[in-house]
Image (tube, rainbow, N blue to C red):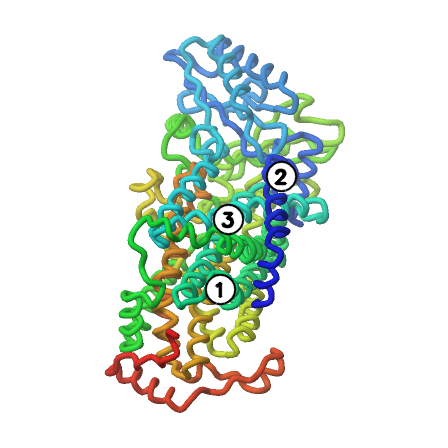
Amino acid sequence: MERFGALLLRHRLVVTLAWVVVTIVGVLMAPNVGGRLQSGTTVNTASYHANVALQKEYGGVGANPSVLVVDLPHGVTADSPAVKAGLTAADKVAAGVPGVRDLSFATTGDQALVGSGGTSTLVMVYPPVSGNAVDAPVLDAMGSAITGDVPGAVVHQTGIEQLSAGGTGGGSSVLTELLVGVGLALIVLAWVFGSALAPLPLLSALVSVLTMQLAIYGLTYVTSIHINPSVQFIVALLGLGLSVDYSLLLVNRWREERDRGADNRQAVVRAVKRAGHSVAFSALIASLGLFALIVVPVSFLQGVGLSGLFIPSIAALVALTTIPLLLSTVGPRLDKIRLRRRKSTGPGAMWTRTAKAIVARPKTAAVTGLAILGTLCAFGLTINIASPASTSLAANGPAQQGLAALQHDGFPTGVLTSIPIELPAGTDPAATAATLRALPSMHGVLVADNPAWQHSGSSVIMGLPTSEIGTSHAGSALADLHAAVPHNAMIGGDLVQSTDVTHIMSSWFPVLLGVVALLTFVLLARGMRSLLLPAKAVALNVLSVGAAYGVLVLIWQLGWGSKSLWGIPATGSISPFVPMLLFAFLFGVSMDYEVFILARVREAYDRTGRTNDAVVEGVSRTGRLVTSAALILFLALASLSSAPDVTIKMMATGMAAGVLIDAVVVRTLLTPALVVLFGRANWYLPAWAARLLRVKPSAPGHALDAQDAADADDGSADAPTPHPSVHA
């Protein structure tokens, strides 16, 4: 790393121009990235193949429908001529839009579409492409056609897609929330540095995110794996968090070297040498942790895993090149522009006191930390993975009002998750529908005798379950249908496929955990030259993720705060993709903090030979850094929790809670306490393990570690006096 730093400074003009070009190209190409990404999920299940066949023959009938809830004026019923004329007019509007199909009382004559007392009716409208909602202007035109023939009728619009968009049908505000997060990050950085150095990490983050977008764009041309548009959100989030983490570490180390008397060039080279290893090592672990998602046979997760291989590595590369170049040129001048009184870069007084307190009472600190994690993990074990119920998707807005009207009219919310059933040629749709209507789990089965729903080689009937498919209260509708439909019929639907994907992810999660844990353990064992430290790190990471799951359960599944903070009642479940993405994200980010702390502890131990002294130095010099980095990421994630989509809310709150728990409870409490308790065993790497890992063996420790362990056991001693060379 020292040679890398020196080489970087010798060729800083070339490197600077290279990043300027990459940034400009990134800005120009960023609008085109979305067009290369593919929505939807590819998976080898019967429901997926059914949806593919349905899309080819009948368009988006597998989508969750947009639903018009028509409340009729007093004295008018659904079977009146005026209502049928209005519904027929609405059907013609839908038929005039390429790919749009609808089912109404006029086209089916089915009483399942008529509400209590006959004073309301539903119109089910399906988009041209599954996974999308019908355009609002089309729904508005259909509503106008109905009210044109039925004056006084009130038409509401609702549906799973409209509710998921926050009840307004508008787009996500992820970009806006990320900009808010960047603003909050700048405030924290200004407080951390107390000088005009604050924007440097954000500048590095900007270059990183644009470079990542280019990498994703190029990736779409060289892989057959579908990369979902959600990857752009993950890139922006991880790019911001990791870039700030790595930049903070480098700038902080540069300041330390300057305070020790090094000139600017020496300080830059030493910062790259001493902090660069931690940055590169951390990025390697985070990259492989995300890449491990590729083992799960679900295209969405494989796309995230493939993209994740580049996200931390690009963040590290950008930080290791742009930050040293900026520090070598404008760093000293920016550091002189004071925003507040500059604190020393030496060990923080508060963190030194904290470290000494932990060293003096390691058992108390460990028990406290484990009690917090254990309690949250206990809640995490009760996690229920399923799609949120429709009543939990939006707190207010037109779609929520439409849902309330639908329920008031006596319709079950299961009609929002209709199930298309494709029947082969020779099968009577009406007879099959009559059989399926007898199932107690079905509200109705719709049959439309027109070319939009019946082709020469097949036909589609639409099942309306009583309970919402894919949720934690889905009932037995799917099982009943599979048992009752003809053996060569195909059952599709977005939420039917989502149910299958949930089962796959649940069964593959232990495999993912094992792969990530093994990779992390091996890499940490090589980097730390220890067996106990990586085992502890992996175990604490698992507990940290489990605690984040516990927070998700408390806030969303049980509703402890979701109503007061976001106006959304308890969802009763957690969206299927959230737990696995949360695991990959937190395992990577939290390992950053672990590496930052333990690398500094190991550095001090190699110099002093005293475990307790090493813990005090490591925590006192990295505590402020780790908590500041975690605070920045926490604020960015907390701002994202106000996005309209409930799944993004879950992701944001789970990640924010996980980052905070990991930084405060795990890294600054449990990690140092356990290192103290383990004493010289921390540093032991037997010869056989060293040969396997291809590193030098590590001795069990110096004799004075025994005294450290004794001090820790009885809790009676303060931290030993640091070795004179610790702060040299």
Inspect the image, locate mark 3, and give the three-letter code of the amino acid beneath it: Ala
What residue sits right under mark 3 in the picture? 205
Residue at the spot x=40%, y=91% of the render? 703
Residue 223 seen? yes
Tag shown at residue 271: 1
Q: Distance between the residues labelled 2 and 3?
A: 18 Å
**CB of mark 3 within 8 Å of CB of mark 1?**
no
Which of the 4 image quadrants contains residue 57? top right
Residue at the spot x=55%, y=19% of the render? 138
**Image label count:** 3
Q: Return the x and y of residue 697 as percentages of the image width and height.
A: 55, 84
Q: Considering the numbered disc 1 on the image, is that residue within a helix, a strand or a loop? A: helix
In the visual, does 266 lie left or right of 677?
Answer: right
- The local crowd at label 1, few if under 14, some if 14 to 19, many if 20 or more residues have their Cα within 10 Å, is many
Q: Considering the numbered disc 3 on the image, is that residue within a helix, a strand or a loop? A: helix
From this viewpoint, which residue is outermost toward the bottom? 703
